[in-house]
Image (cartoon, rainbow, N blue to C red):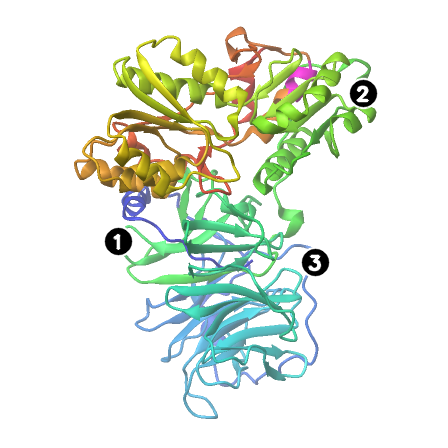
Amino acid sequence: MKKKSLIISVLLIFVLFLLFACSPAPTPAPAVPSAAAAAAVQSSDVPPTPMPTQAPTPTAAPPLPCNITFESDRDGNPEIYVMGPDGSNQVNLSNNPAEDSNPVWSPDGSRIAFVSNRESETGGGQFIYVMQADGRNVQQLSKQNESKYPDWSPDGSHIVYNDKGDIYLVNLSDGSEVNLSNSPENDEQPKFSPDSQRIAWIKGEGKDTAIFTMNLQGGDVQQVTHAGKVNDLEWTVDGRLFSHWENPEGVCFNCLLSADGKQVSNAGGKGDIQQYLPFWTLDHQRVEMASGPGPQGDEEIFLVGNNFDGMFLYLTQNPANDRNPDAPFGCGGEAAAPQPAKPAEAGAQPSGGKELVIGYEDGDNLLTTVMQQDLDQACSELGIKCIRGENMRTLLEQKVNAILSVSNRWHVLGTYPDLHEAASQGVPVFVLNAESGEPGIYNLSAENEVVTATLKWMFTQMGGQGDFVYLNFGQSDYYQVLIDSSLKQFPNIKTTGIAVDFNKPYTQADFQTLIEKSPAIDAVWSSDFDKELFWGINSAQSDHLPLANCTPRMEILTNWKNAVDGGSSFKCLAFVKPGGTAYEGVYAAYYFLNGLKFKPDALVGEGHNTLKYDLPEINNETLPDWLMKLDQLRENQAGVYELPPMSPEEIKTKWFVE
């Protein structure tokens, strides 16, 4: 288990303050030395134990207790403490007048490495030290004065740290040490990958820092992030990188990056990080462990999870700074991991008792990492087989019971023959993020509703008259039909369509020029590149700003509010779209295959086959409220806020008749 920090806003601090008094009191936990025992092992009569001559073998079974080591200045100077997974038995292990900080567990839970500037045989300085889990046998490990940021490899064989801007690797079998980076640039915060084969670190200084990775010989160096500022990093349990990255597109607060940097997504908000940086409680619940400002302003260590009242459980509660928590890698282990949820009751299994098989296809590579995780989670919870196929026809050949099609407005057009074939064979298809009117097809999308509601809002705000400009990228017939049908109700609106295609995107400057040269425009709608539309309007030198459609991104929402607070006449409308269609699609298919019928009012759209969502609407009036509750949403890989998946019970209640 790697430690992580949590940046918390002033608002969240206030909320935590309200919740603080309601946090459940910790219960005693085993496996942490008592204060008396800790005092005893500080005795100079205890003979030193030499460092091991070979790498320790991590404990496999039973799983390690998730005891936590952390740093605290409650004694007047930074010391290394240990406590149980519920915050019980907090014991000072280092008990030294020097500054002891940044503790990390060995993977087998037997030792702790930490940073100290204590007096040593070689004099003063700041080095990496190692002690046993009860505080005995403290020994200096590193040779470089100014050592910091130690990290223990998951296989127990090495410790990595940085000193004076270089990354050093210590082989614990013989104590040898090598400079891996050895460069004039600043290199720091090294972290081992879960398989112990690579090291990630942050290179650079100030506002120009990036994540790099290398092997244990210092070779095969790969740059993961480009441009911007990386504040921290951790490896996730599935071999990705977690970071808070201020990139040119805005702050990626909880960033998930593939090890090569090619895939970037958002890990979600509080309660979601446990998937990537897990900690196991005494009752084997998988939660998050973090440190950050507490109600009194000092730093505290706490757990975050849905099983806690108010989501937070404080482990430390004292007027001091408790920070940098760490638990042994893999503590709790898979044996202690929570078991998959039982399938929601859905009626009888299909006739004949045959195993359900749901197929899914992603012909245009539209399935994001988060969507894949949602899909896998739903299949696991239901205990059904889900297989991926090259296309719908290959899935039909494999005799699947239902198909999920990961789609968009272009993909759904190209796969019409396959959709028709599946429907003709009686295999239900659930289209994700697009809409088809083909009978036997069910859509999990809100595109039709969002477009028509936005256009109606614009035309109503205009009083049914004025100049309306729209940009239909790629000349999509789908959008053109929606625009034309919406305009029929407002015959006095003067309409101008601008022909654009994806080979030459409309830029912020193009939108700005359009508005400045045509001050009579009352509304502008764009099927794509609406981020450029927003910035173009905000940059325009005009007393008359047109209505627009917006995307719920953090940088847009905050600048939108700043403009309104500054007296701007700008008005915008944004809808929060569904973000959990893969999870919801699996459950919808499962319930449907088990004989449940759709509610009549659950199916909407032109084909009366699109499942209805309750979409949050963000406008000038509701914007301040939504900025205060964005933690109820989650960000996709493009930084757009979306609805999280509904629960199985919500899906059944909202869409099906039992």
Q: Nearer the viewer, residue 643 or 494?
A: 494
Which residue has dot 3 on it? 60
Residue 593 part of the magenta segment: yes
Asked where in the image residue 193 lies, by quadrant, the reply is: bottom right
Q: Which residue is mark 2?
A: 354
Q: What secondary structure prevails in the magenta region? A: helix
Instruction: Tell me the mark number nearer the camera, choosing from 3 and 2.
Output: 2
Q: Is residue 422 magenta?
A: no
Q: Residue 231, relative to residue 421: is it above or below?
A: below
Quadrant of image for the N terminus: bottom right
- Gap in Å between the C-alphas at discs 2 and 1? 59 Å
- Magenta stretch, residue numbers: 589-594
Callout 3 secondary element: loop
Q: What residue appears at the point 49 percent right and 49 percent down from the top-left corner? A: 288
- Image point (32%, 70%), residue name: 75
Coordinates of residue 85 in the picture (x, y in percent): 50, 54
In the rendered structure, find residue 296 and report the number of the disc placed on it. 1
Give the SS element for disc 2: loop
The CA distance from mark 1 to mark 3 is 40 Å
Place of residue 123 in the rendered image (x, y in percent of width and height, measured from the top left): 43, 92
Side (left or right) of 335 relative to 638: right
